[in-house]
Image (cartoon, rainbow, N blue to C red):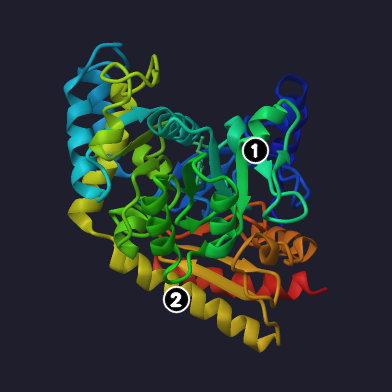
């Protein structure tokens, strides 16, 4: 078991100055217990903590590291920008056009795109734009989908998925909650019901086309196409939130994988290659409403800054040059099959969901297709499993309801080690 003395000390100190000791809640290990590990250095698929322990990383900074940490091409590009260009201007720069043009080429729905600084900014802005464009106030989201921490998204469905939302968090006004309707993932009838009850009032439907924030839940065949059809018929803006699955499940995101084109797309994570970047874009007719061309206001002092764009742009270029997706699929299949064997050997019927290199092992025998089936998972068992993996030097998300990410730099040897550790951890989880 690794010694984490220094992490414990740092966490105690951090709690004095930072709420909960962390700058983003899930890092605090609340749902698995124990002390968060303070990392000191990243390299490829590995991270080393402040006590000198090394971990094989399946969190990948929560998604961005599809090429691993400190990819030599990305580091070199960043060094070049730092030495020869600068960190910020607050004026237009050529690189902004380069990334916008490239994104419009890669992602099917994009005709125009605006760069922002996080996924949250992207989704907030996309929803404002949809409201401005349609002149309607309400939005439909899906129970269990995460779209960042904007007020409109922090609404859960209460006791039934079809009821009006109540705020998930103090500070979100009742008025905001009233404008957010919650539907059930993979259940088109639940969406139609809400649309009919709110005829002519729904500005947008926003969805993760591969849900990755309730563990991993793939959209079932036909579900996204049915949403597309409904939105077209009702004049509703369909927004795919591809902050996690974009450039992950395919270069062109879930929309290219499934062949369903939304009106607007939000992006983040991989698009910043480890630096803070987000983007939203889509149909020209809608995007032309964004200021200063149009009347829907959206701005950012550091938006499109050279360092962040350099990391994003270089990441996209590597993804295009190397096409790692078939390899990612092969590796993810090895993990899936290995875990599956282990479960069988131990007589466990737990469910695995996977799309490409994002996957999740749910501690439940119930097929997970939406939020209510996801929460049948036994989080206590997951907590034991997580800590056993950590003790074996494998770093996975400190929550049952997060994805496991495989990167291009995980080797077959790494995967083998992980499958062995998975067996041991499953044994521990059942004790
Ligand atoms: C991570 C995530 C966000 C929020 O992005 P931040 O950069 O953390 O603000 C939004 N939507 C989805 C689908 C995400 O996975």
Residue in the foreground of this view, choosing between 48 and 289:
289
Decide if residue 181 is on the left or right side of residue 69.
right
Query: Is 40 on the left-hand or right-hand side of 426?
Result: left
Mark 1 Cα shell of 10 Å, populated few (<14), some (14-19), many (≥20): many
Quadrant of the image occupied by residue 184: bottom right
Residue 148, image x, y percentages:
55, 38
Taking the view exactly as shown, the residue that stands out farthest to the top is 90
SS for dot 1:
loop
Residue 76 appears in the figure: no
Q: CA distance from mark 2 to mark 1?
A: 36 Å
* In the image, residue 186 above or below residue 73: below
- Reply above or below: 58 against 75: below
Residue 154: mark: 1
- Give the x, y percent position of residue 40: 54, 36
Question: Helix, strand, or loop for circle 2?
Answer: helix
- Answer with the quarter of the image where residue 329 lies: bottom left
Looking at the image, which residue is at 73% across and 56% down?
160
In the picture of the structure, the residue carrying the numbered disc 2 is: 334
């Amino acid at each position: 078991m690794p010694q984490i003395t220094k992490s414990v000390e740092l966490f105690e100190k951090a709690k004095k100055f930072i709420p909960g000791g962390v700058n983003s809640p899930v890092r605090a290990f609340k749902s698995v217990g124990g002390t968060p590990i303070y990392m000191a250095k990243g390299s490829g698929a590995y991270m080393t903590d402040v006590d000198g322990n090394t971990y094989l990383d399946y969190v990948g900074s929560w998604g961005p590291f599809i090429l691993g940490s400190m990819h030599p091409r990305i580091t070199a590009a960043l060094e070049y920008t730092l030495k020869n260009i600068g960190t910020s201007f607050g004026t237009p720069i050529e690189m902004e056009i380069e990334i916008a043009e490239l994104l419009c080429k890669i992602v099917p729905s994009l005709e125009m795109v605006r760069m922002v600084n996080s996924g949250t900014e992207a989704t907030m802005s996309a929803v404002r734009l949809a409201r401005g464009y349609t002149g309607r106030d309400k939005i439909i989201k899906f129970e269990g989908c995460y779209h960042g921490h904007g007020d409109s998204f922090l609404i859960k469905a209460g006791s039934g998925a079809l009821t009006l939302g109540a705020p998930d968090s103090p500070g979100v006004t009742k008025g905001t909650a009233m404008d957010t309707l919650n539907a059930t993932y993979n259940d088109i009838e639940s969406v139609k019901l809400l649309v009919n009850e709110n005829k002519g009032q729904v500005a947008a439907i926003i969805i993760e086309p591969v849900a990755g924030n309730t563990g991993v839940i793939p959209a079932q065949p036909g579900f996204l196409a049915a949403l597309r059809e409904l939105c077209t018929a009702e004049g509703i803006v369909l927004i795919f939130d591809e902050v996690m699955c974009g450039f992950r499940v395919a270069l062109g995101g879930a929309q290219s994988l499934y062949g369903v084109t939304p009106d607007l797309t939000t992006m983040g994570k991989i698009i910043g290659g480890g630096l803070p970047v987000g983007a939203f874009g889509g149909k020209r007719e809608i995007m032309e409403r964004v200021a200063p061309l149009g009347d829907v206001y959206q701005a950012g002092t550091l938006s499109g800054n050279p360092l962040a764009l350099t990391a994003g742009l270089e990441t996209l270029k590597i993804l295009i040059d190397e096409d790692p997706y078939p390899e990612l699929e092969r590796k993810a299949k090895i993990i899936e099959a290995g875990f599956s064997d282990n479960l069988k050997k131990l007589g466990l019927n737990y469910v695995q969901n996977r799309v490409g290199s994002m996957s999740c092992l749910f501690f439940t025998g119930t097929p997970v297709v939406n939020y209510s089936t996801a929460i049948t998972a036994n989080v206590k068992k997951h907590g034991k499993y997580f800590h056993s993996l950590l003790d074996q030097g494998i770093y996975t998300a400190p929550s049952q309801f997060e994805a496991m990410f495989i990167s291009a730099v995980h080797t077959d040897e790494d995967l083998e080690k992980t499958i062995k550790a998975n067996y041991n951890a499953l044994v521990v989880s059942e004790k």
